[in-house]
Amino acid sequence: MLSRIALKPVRSAIQPIRLTQTSATTNAASAAVAESPERDLVNFPRPVRQELPGKVRLGFIPEEWFQFFYAKTGVTGPYTFGLGLTTYLCSKEIYIMEHEFYTGLSIAIMGIYAVKKLGPSVATYLDKEVAKSDAEMNAGRDLAIEQCKNRVVAEKVEQDRALAQKMLFEAKRENVALQLEAAYREQLIKVFAETKKRLDYQVEVQNVQRNLEQRHIVDWVLRSVRAAVTPEQEKATLSQCIANIKSLAQQNTARI
Amino acid sequence: MMANLFSIFDPASTLSLPLNWFASTLGLFLLPWVYWVQSNRYHKMFSMISNQLHLEFKTLVGPASSQGHTLIFISLFMFILFNNLLGLAPYVFTASSHLAMTLSLAMPLWFSFMIYGWFNHTRHMLAHLVPLGTPGILMPFMVLIETISNLIRPGTLAVRLAANMIAGHLLLVLLGNQGPSLSSSLLSFLLGTQILLLTLEGAVAVIQSYVFAVLATLYSSEVV
């Protein structure tokens, strides 16, 4: 672990892993503004968080050690070295396999079995717990974003409502126009009725006048005729009538 | 060279200084490296255990608990746990199997509790010597018994931990010593038994550290 840090190469300026990204953090202008001009990022780059554990071979030997050997001894170098060293230690009895060795062997078997069998499930469970705490940490921010989104939607609804108001105004205008039309028609009919009444009156007046004139003329004619009838004419007419009646009577008696 | 069976516990070092006790600091390497706000898996597991312990100890102390009351006991638990577990690994000195260490943990704790309690809450401590519901005749004997049980508390704390560790290691060493003299066919039985024993020892390591911390919490809660 410590050798890994000692052999770690100096990293170039890589974008650090963030929890979430918004447009503000990807905006080049805002990123430039966020950095302090006095900060030396070339010699002291920002540390980057590792996503996965470091690479190991055989479960516990860091990959960097193999790279260290690679230049001189190639691919099989470290393995040969390890095997040779253990054989040397065991055969020269520098390392004696006494009780601690068998304890170590048992622990190694237990460890390998536990990592192979229980490792993935424990890892997924812990990842879930980490995600839960991440969500808790981001909760305030996410809530604020959610609220802003909801406000945008509500704003759209309000805008639609405002448009609907315009339609309401149109409807109201139409309503008023209809009412005006109805009033106009009513007044028109009233005017018509009034005019007709006046004209009917005139007609009636004329009719009455004509009737009066007719009666007056008839009366005048009768009066003048009656005035024109002299007593001699009356006598003559009367005698003529009597004569006519006598002749008729005679005719009747002759028929019977 | 094993002079007797217990020579495995002898403090050993190449120089004349007792450097073997630095094995207690090995636990510091197992503490999670926390640099980022976002935790990694190991730190998450560690903090989950710590939080669970904190909740348990808080419940044990009850209404008398104050802010940070559980911190020392969680640290105690972690320290003893690392000592016990790392001691199971080969060639690592088990510091908690020595009374020198366990007594150094138990004695100051108990002494401080007693001094604080007896000087500041004398009547409360005297009341504790007679449990609730004791018949009147038995009260003098109860006082004696409670006093004795109180006085042996540091001893029991220390000896319990040391004895458990010694017993476990002894069994492992006895079993392991048969290894070189066995044929390869019987070796699998030996390894199987050792694996079972190691599982037991791992459980005992965790349980003993938990017991030590819980008892220390209880003793502290009695005094407050």
Image (tube, rainbow, N blue to C red):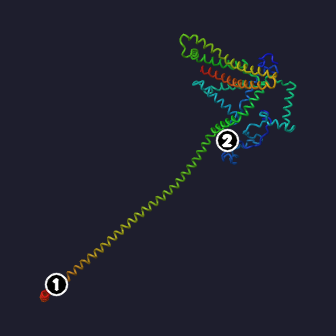
Left or right of residue A119: residue A205: left
- Amino acid carrying mark 1 in the image: Arg
Query: Does residue A231 appear in the picture of this structure?
Result: no
Q: Nearer the viewer, residue A198 or B172?
A: B172
Is residue A175 toward the left or the right of residue B168 in the image?
Answer: left
Q: Do the residues labelled 1 and 2 touch (CB within 8 Å)?
A: no
Quadrant where the C terminus of chain B lies?
top right
Residue highlighted by disc 1? A226
Q: Residue B148 location in percent, x, y? A: 63, 13
Which residue: 75% across, 31% down?
A112
Check disc 1 and report its element: helix, strand or loop. Answer: helix
Pointer 2 residue: A19
Q: Height in image: B41 above or below A156? A: above
Q: What residue type is labelled 2?
A: Leu
Q: Provide residue A244's location: percent of width, then percent of height.
A: 14, 88
Residue B117, image quadrant: top right
Residue shown at the point (61%, 40%) measured from the top left: A140
Number of numbered tags placed on the structure image: 2
Q: From what the image shows, is residue A45 above or below residue A174? A: above
Q: Which of marks 1 and 2 is in front?
A: 1
Kindly report the distance in space between the C-alpha atoms of the residues bearing marks 1 and 2.
Answer: 134 Å
Q: Position of residue B190 (x, y in %)?
A: 77, 24
- Lower sequence index among marks 1 and 2: 2
Secondary-structure class at tag 2? loop
| A22 displayed left or right of A176 | right
Residue that extends furthest to the front in the rendered view of this protein: A256
Q: Is residue A56 visible?
A: yes
